[in-house]
Image (cartoon, rainbow, N blue to C red):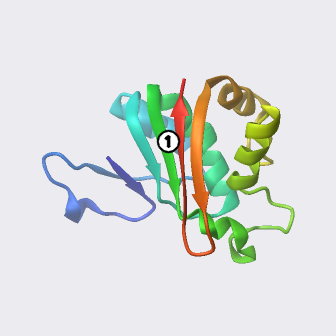
Amino acid sequence: YGIDVYDFKDVETENVKTFICDQESRKDLDELLISIGGELDIIIDDGGHRMNQHQISLATLFKYLKKGGYYIIEDLQTCTHPAYRDSPTDDSIVDILNDFKVGGKIKGQYMTPEEENFLEDNIKDFKMDVSHMSGIVIIEKK
């Protein structure tokens, strides 16, 4: 499955299905994942790379992963660039996950307390590598 704000039906095949969906809309994401049957093995966020998009997508989509599934966010180098922040105080997913590793708490200004608690209770582990040119995190679900 592929999700984007633009129509990519021209790349569909028997095994590839695409959907138009806004990653900043919890409602749209929930409706789409419910319609395709939920529980996925892997979710890769190669989306808009803004801090709110990372947080909303992770907070909404993580619940649709199977136990032992992986949630991947790429291009994390954008977390260090002001152009991808709506305000200077935007939390990056890199900071949020590093804080979680140290203190066991998820706190993001674009996440609800229920979403934060769900992530705290269901993230088994993650591996992250970020440089000024690239970055990726692979999050494993309990």
Give the answer, above or below, for where 68 lies relative to 43.
Answer: above
User: Which of the two residues, 3 or 82, is positioned nearer the viewer here?
Assistant: 82
The quarter holding residue 106 reads top right
User: Which of the two residues, 7 or 111, is positioned nearer the viewer here?
Assistant: 111
What's the amino acid at mark 1?
Answer: Tyr
User: Which of the two residues, 76 or 64, is positioned nearer the viewer here?
Assistant: 76
Q: How many numbered markers are drawn?
A: 1
Tell whether 25 sits left or right of 68: right
Residue 26 visible at all: no
Secondary-structure class at tag 1: strand
Tell whether 11 sits left or right of 79: left
Tell whether 79 sits left or right of 88: left
Image quadrant in which the C terminus is located: top right
Mark 1, residue position: 71
Tell whether 33 sits left or right of 142: left
Q: Position of residue 111 (x, y in %)?
A: 74, 41
Give the answer, above or below, for where 117 lies relative to 62.
Answer: above
Q: Circle 1: is it few (<14), some (14-19), or many (20+) Cα within 10 Å?
A: many
Q: Position of residue 21 (x, y in %)?
A: 46, 52
At x 13% / y 47%, what residue is drawn? 14
Give the answer, above or below, for where 20 lies relative to 103.
Answer: below
At x 66% / y 31%, what residue is drawn? 119
The quarter holding residue 81 reads bottom right
Q: Position of residue 50 (x, y in %)?
A: 64, 63
Q: Position of residue 71 (x, y in %)?
A: 50, 41
At x 61% / y 25%, what residue is drawn? 122
Residue 51 visible at all: yes
Q: Residue furthest left?
A: 14
Q: Residue furthest right?
A: 89
